[in-house]
Amino acid sequence: MRFVIQRVLESEVKVDGESLGKIGKGFMVLIGVSDSDTREIADKMVKKMLGLRIFEDEQGKTNLSLDSVGGELLLISQFTLYANCKRGNRPSFIEAGAPDMASDMYEYIIEKCKAQVPVVERGRFGADMKISLVNDGPFTIVLDSDTL
């Protein structure tokens, strides 16, 4: 499982011009699922993400977590995080999770986050989404379950 976490001042996702989710200060998270991912892996990834202390405290040090700053979440599914570009110039996505399983895992992650974060917005699995954001920093973290 892979999460690309961007600390944002604001972020929004649209499908066909309709806003599906919009947040202020918090994390915009791109979520990639592989066929080998499990709920236990998702639990570990969510715990790590929500525990990240990457917001600045009064001294300007990155020492505060999402809950410490009243941050919000925008969660976006993105199978292309499992693109394999080793051969040729056309990426292969065979390492990405099968759509039904990946969709179920995405929904599970959303529900786990909603149990801990007051504002959780989302994209639409499998849709052509347009995402806008103001990255704060810029600050981007990549979490990969294979390296946690």
Image (cartoon, rainbow, N blue to C red):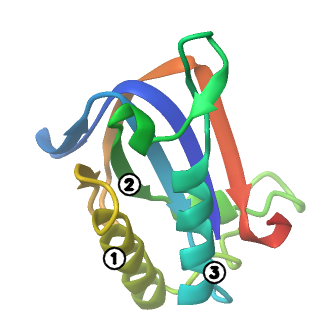
Residue 124 in the figure: left or right of residue 69: left
The correct choice, above or below, for 22 with respect to 98 in the image is above
* Mark 1 or 3: the one toward you: 3
* Marks 2 and 1 in Cβ contact (< 8 Å): no
- Residue 16: % across, % down: 15, 46
Hey, which quadrant is residue 147 in on the image? bottom right
**Secondary structure of the residue carrying numbered label 3:** helix
- Please tell me the numbered disc located at residue 41: 3
- Residue 144: % across, % down: 73, 62
Q: Which residue is mark 2?
A: 75
**Secondary structure of the residue carrying numbered label 1:** helix
Residue at position x 34%, y 68% in the image: 110
Residue sitting nearer the eye, 120 or 116: 116
Residue at position x 81%, y 57% in the image: 85
Q: Quadrant of the N terminus?
A: bottom right
- Residue 40: % across, % down: 59, 87
Give the class, few, some or many, for how many residues have Cα within 10 Å of label 3's Cα (few <14, many ≥20). some
Residue at position x 51%, y 31% in the image: 7
* Mark 2 or 3: the one toward you: 3
- Please tell me the numbered disc located at residue 137: none
Residue sitting nearer the eye, 131 or 37: 37
Q: Which residue is mark 1?
A: 107
Give the class, few, some or many, for how many residues have Cα within 10 Å of label 2's Cα (few <14, many ≥20). many
The correct choice, above or below, for 75 with respect to 97 in the image is above
Precedes in sequence: disc 2 or disc 1:
2
The correct choice, above or below, for 122 with respect to 133 in the image is below
* Marks 1 and 3 in Cβ contact (< 8 Å): no
Q: Amino acid at mark 2?
A: Leu
Give the class, few, some or many, for how many residues have Cα within 10 Å of label 1's Cα (few <14, many ≥20). some
Q: Amino acid at mark 3?
A: Ile
